Image (spheres, rainbow, N blue to C red):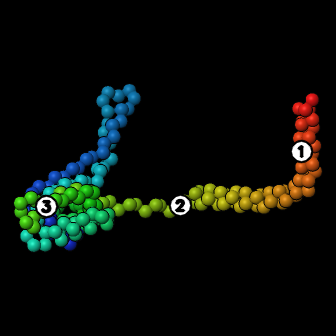
Amino acid sequence: MRPMLDDLELPQVQEITTYDRRMLAEHKPPGMDGSLLQNLGRRPGHLTLWGVKTGPGSLEFVETLEQKFRAGQPVPFVADIIADAEIETMIIDDLQWQEVAGKPDRYSYLITLREYIEPVEPEETSLLQNDILDDAGDLFNDLVNGLDIGMDFATGLERFVTPLSDMLGRLQQFRRTLEGR
């Protein structure tokens, strides 16, 4: 069975390389010799493959690969080598292709794929979180009401503008008088 990327059969695949890494946490309990390892699962699998497409339709093939890469959407991937890994959906991380010199209608391609893991939906908020959210909403409403009072305060200061402006003018005149001596 040839590898399939979405609806596209990948012809003449020369090499497939897989990269899998486990996440382990080491814990050193106090007063004990040695340590304990905790298995935290695995990271998303990576897969690199390269192949060649020859004959008519070769350019259209690599251009279709390029469109799938640019779209950035998860695509189904099927290959015998990863059947046991139970990887079904991949994202194209990188794509490189080039025309093979001296051979008409012959293109080589290199694809790097990363396993796509569906994001986990956030859990429902608990009763405690709802209470905190309600308290925050009440505080925000109090703040908005306080801003309304601030507008009354600002407009109430208008009656002091003229007397304070006159006083500022007199202080500036006094300073000029002192500097003139």
Mark 1–mark 2 CB contact (< 8 Å): no
Horizontally, residue 175 falls left or right of residue 88, namely: right
Residue tagged 1: 168
Residue sitting at x 24%, y 53%: 46
Q: Can residue 1 be seen in this view?
A: no
Mark 3–mark 2 CB contact (< 8 Å): no
Residue 105: x, y in percent? 9, 67
Horizontally, residue 142 falls left or right of residue 111, namely: right
Horizontally, residue 165 falls left or right of residue 8, namely: right
Quadrant where the image shows the C terminus:
top right
Q: Nearer the viewer, mark 1 or mark 2?
A: 1
Quadrant where the image shows the N terminus:
bottom left
Q: Quadrant of residue 170?
A: top right
Residue 86: x, y in percent? 22, 61
Q: Can residue 30 be seen in this view?
A: yes
Residue sitting at x 33%, y 40%: 25
Compared with residue 6, is residue 111 higher up or lower down, i.e. above or below? above
State which tag comes first along the sequence, 1 or 2. 2
Measure the C-alpha gap from mark 1 to mark 3: 81 Å
Asked whether 34 or 60 is in front, the reply is 60
Q: What's the mark number on residue 99?
A: 3
Residue 131: x, y in percent? 63, 59
State which tag comes first along the sequence, 3 or 2. 3
Q: What's the mark number on residue 125?
A: 2
Residue sitting at x 35%, y 36%: 27
Measure the C-alpha gap from mark 1 to mark 2: 58 Å
Q: In which quarter of the image is residue 115?
A: bottom left
Q: Which of marks 3 and 2 is in front?
A: 3
Compared with residue 33, is residue 124 higher up or lower down, i.e. above or below? below
**Residue type, numbered disc 3:** Glu
Q: In which quarter of the image is residue 24?
A: top left
Q: What's the mark number on residue 20?
A: none
